[in-house]
Image (cartoon, rainbow, N blue to C red):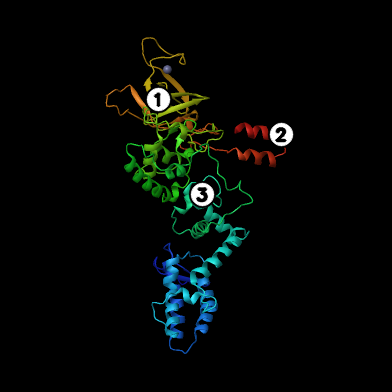
Amino acid sequence: MGTDLTLIKANPPLKDARYLGIYIRSRAGQSHVIKRAQQEITSITNALRHKKVTASQIAYVNNVVLMARLEYRLKTTLVSENQCQTLHNRMITLLKTKMRIIRFANNNIFMHQNMVGLVPLSQHLRTAQYSEFIIRINSRDWDGISTRIMLRNAQLRIGLQVCILVDHTELILKINLQNNFNFNLLKSFKDQMFSFRPTDLTTWNLTTQHQHTIISILHTSVDVGHTNFRKLEQSRIKAIESFIKRPAELLDINFLDHITHNNGVDMLFWTQIKKIFGKNPKGPIPNFFKYLEEIAIDQNSNGQRTLIERYQATIIPTNKTISLTPSPPSRDRRRKEWIVIRDGDEYQFGKILKKNLTRFSYQHWIRQDNNNLITQCAGCSTNSTHIEDNPVCIKKEKYHKSTIIDVKRPTNNYQNTSTFEILTPVDLIKTRIITKPSLYENESPFVSLDIPSYYLDIIKRTISSTLLITELSDIL
Ligand SMILES: [Zn+2]
């Protein structure tokens, strides 16, 4: 770094560094803070050990000096009752020695106002941290913003539909989130039966079409009458853990809306979900998803993966919460992709046969009713160029009007080459895009632009020309 190229080395993950009186390290966790607090206590007890001091002097040092220092050190660390006792014990032991009282004497004696009046660490920390939390959560500064971000993050991770500050007490007390100080503080509040009344709830509430959220299903005990009761109950506990600990890249998956399609009635496959959220579809299926598949899918739906009625969406979605961005076939003539063309509510399926610069020809395939199986079309009414002697149905289409899809042979062992199963949830393919086919093959072939509906408001608010507004809105 700099002109003399000084080499700067990063601290190892467990070594802490001081910045403006705060100790931070790269590894998440709080053990280094507890260690610093311990050093703070040791330095004070060591200083007092060989001096002649009275009990009230020790109480003064404890209540005025030590408590203030520890409060500062433990500002962003939630220390459990037990940890507080362990930390504070050194000070109490010193007091006992100075008062010539046996070590086994009950600590509570020294906390009494009319005797020594030693302030216990846990009580001091709770009072300080609780009151600061109340101030912080209402603050418009960075401390307030970051507090609210951490709480919203916890709300998303748990998958709560309404504001995390209100209700959910029973649920939150059962959930362990590490390294989220504000959440743990809130949990401690709820444990003490405090309740909050936020003034503006709407911004915290998340929209879902399902009455049951993923967490609420996971949190409901399995029916005792179930044949697999014990085994299911065990996998349910594992499922909650796997859901809460899901990686940050899967944080967007928090409601049934995100794992279902066909108007919130059928459950998607895990690989489909990962593809929709733009993640690598490889990797194991998380436990929570396996559990949901077992408990929420109607076993009589014949591979349709239809949800049990009470878990189906209660509202017909107006705006889909998840969608697939269409990807047109490549211009590479050697690749013969499977494609779907959407025309309103109608879908045309097919496999590409030949490509040229602007169009391609494809073999028409027809979807059977009520499932995802497609069979080759031997000539149909939608095709005027059909020749009687040749039982094939070949059509032509432009690149930007079609989307590539994944298909596979059905698993039902029969070696039938004329049936394929569609893997891509075609009902989730977005329809509103502007595409610009390029003139030259090597030029970036597509510029696609998605405009969410809330931009409509922005357009209306910022543009005065009515003609331009209609034109822009038409694009949407
Ligand atoms: Zn046809």
Label 3 to label 1, Cα distance in Å?
39 Å
Residue lying farthest bottom?
52
| Residue under pointer 1 | 371
Point out the image quarter for the C terminus: top right
Element at badge 1?
loop
| Residue under pointer 2 | 466
Please state which amino acid type lies under the numbered disc 1: Asn
User: Which residue lies at the image location 56% right of the left edge and 49% below the top edge?
Assistant: 163
Please state which amino acid type lies under the numbered disc 3: His
Element at badge 2?
helix
Element at badge 3?
loop
Please state which amino acid type lies under the numbered disc 2: Thr
Seen in the picture, residue 219 relative to 101 is either above or below; the reply is above
User: Which residue lies at the image location 59% right of the left edge and 60% below the top edge?
Assistant: 134
| Residue under pointer 3 | 168
User: Can residue 287 be seen?
Assistant: yes
Seen in the picture, residue 236 relative to 70 is either above or below; the reply is above
Q: Residues within 10 Å of mark 1 (few under 14, many from 20)?
A: few
Q: Residues within 10 Å of mark 2 (few under 14, many from 20)?
A: few
Q: Position of residue 42 (x, y in %)?
A: 43, 79
Q: In the rendered structure, are the residues bearing label 3 and label 1 in contact, judged by CB atoms less than 8 Å apart? A: no
Q: Position of residue 186 (x, y in %)?
A: 52, 57
In the drawing, does residue 29 fall left or right of residue 317?
Answer: left
* Quarter assignment of residue 34: bottom left
User: Which residue lies at the image location 32% right of the left edge and 43% below the top edge?
Assistant: 230
Residue lying farthest top?
388
